[in-house]
Image: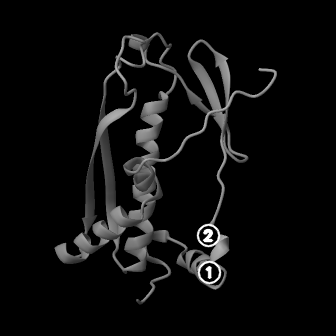
Amino acid sequence: MTIHTHTNDVDLETVQTLARAIAAEPERAATTWRASATWTGAFRSEVRIRAFDPIPSDEPTALGGSDTAPNPVEQLLGALANCLVVGYAVNAAAAGIDLRGLDVDIEGDLDLTTFLGLGGTHAGFDDIRVTVRIDTDADAEAVGRLHDTVVATSPVAHTLQRPVPVAVALAEGA
């Protein structure tokens, strides 16, 4: 594959360097990511990730919040959208596809019955729909290959599509 290092303002050399390092030492592929949330009152909280400014969260007024920030399920949809954008940008650059524009719209259906304690057994999304719009001069076949690659390699999409064990523990003394 020919790598175009300046397409779409993507630093492919850094990505290639990481890929070569992991190919040489596969154990380096196993990474751990962290986030920490702190309650700030009512339905508001802040998430801290690395050294970035806190990311606020709140609920819409219809759910009892003060609607000062996106809620967690909206942030989950946003995480998927952002992950797909990264995938399209880097894979388009690797394929030499110039992007003039890229938009990812996501919506999901969520039944509030379980969340509100009214019965039910599933508090999460029942389905999530994604629409991707790519503005490029690349032909339809190249765009189709790009799309297939992104869908096949998106960490957030894969996480949402497969059962993932989630262990929520209450710390002693809490």
Task: Examine the rendering and report whether any part of residue 139 can be seen.
Answer: no
Q: Are marks 1 and 2 in contact (CB under 8 Å)?
A: no
Residue lying at 44% horizontally and 32% vertically, measured from the top left: 73
Residue lying at 45% horizontally and 54% vertically, measured from the top left: 83
Find disc 2 in the rendering and name its residue. 29
Q: Position of residue 143 (x, y in %)?
A: 25, 71
Side of 154 where 53 appears, left or right? right
Side of 159 where 169 appears, left or right? right
Amino acid found under the numbered disc labelled 2: Ala
Q: Classify mark 1: residues with Cα within 10 Å, few (<14), some (14-19) or many (20+).
A: few
153 relative to 117, above or below: below
Task: Examine the rendering and report whether any part of residue 159 can be seen.
Answer: yes
Side of 8 where 128 appears, left or right? left
Residue 61, picture quadrant: top left
Q: Quick one: 10 or 56, which is closer to the camera?
A: 56
SS state under label 1: helix
Find disc 1 in the rendering and name its residue. 17
Amino acid found under the numbered disc labelled 1: Thr
Q: Earlier in the sequence, mark 1 or mark 2?
A: 1
Q: Nearer the viewer, mark 1 or mark 2?
A: 2
